[in-house]
Amino acid sequence: MAAERLVVQLPVSESTDFDSLIDLENALTLSFLKDKAAAVDGHEIGQGWFNVFIVPRAAPEPIVDRVKALLAQMGVLDNARIARRADPQERYAVIWPDNFRGTFDPGSGVTDEASQKTRPR
């Protein structure tokens, strides 16, 4: 299970409060400290997006539920994407939002099938 990884992605712009993004990363870290079901493995900021990487140490479904609850509590769930890959050789699959259609790459951009264009995340 060590190869499994989740990524939480939020859009950023010139008006984004970057302290709030770091607060989100810290809140995720604290939420897993007690039971160690997962570990936050840092963040990455790119042009138009902010990623927080999470390494599950238990079944990923309850971890995703906990992440979604925390994102909702912080008021950012509607803007977030959560993606998962079971192995480093696999592509990430978006598991939130449920209705996401497209491809996801945390390092380049999101291709949205509805609009058929790549846009920053």
Image: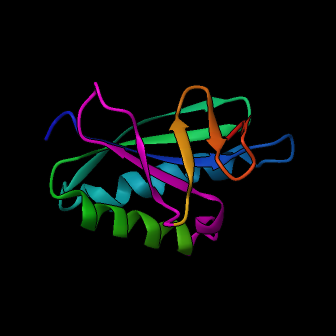
Colour scheme of the rendered structure: rainbow
Image quarter of residue 54: top left
Which quarter of the figure is the N terminus placed in?
top left
Residue 66 located left or right of residue 115: left
Q: In this view, does 98 lie above or below 119?
A: below
- Point out residue 35 in the picture as x, y percentages from the top left corner: 17, 61
Q: Does the magenta stretch include residue 74?
A: yes
Which residue is found at the position 59% from the left and 57% from the top? 80
Which residue is found at the position 38% from the left and 33% from the top? 91
Image quarter of residue 86: top left
Which quarter of the figure is the C terminus placed in?
top right
Which residue is found at the position 55% from the left and 58% from the top? 100
Q: Does the magenta stretch include residue 108?
A: no
Range drawn in magenta: 73-98
- Point out residue 2 in the picture as x, y percentages from the top left corner: 16, 36
Nearer the observer, 97 or 40: 97
Q: Is residue 104 above or below residue 8?
A: above
Residue 51 located left or right of residue 56: right
Furthest residue toward right: 15
- Point out residue 109 in the picture as x, y percentages from the top left corner: 64, 33
Nearer the observer, 103 or 67: 103
- Point out residue 22 in the picture as x, y percentages from the top left corner: 58, 46
Residue 73 located left or right of residue 6: right
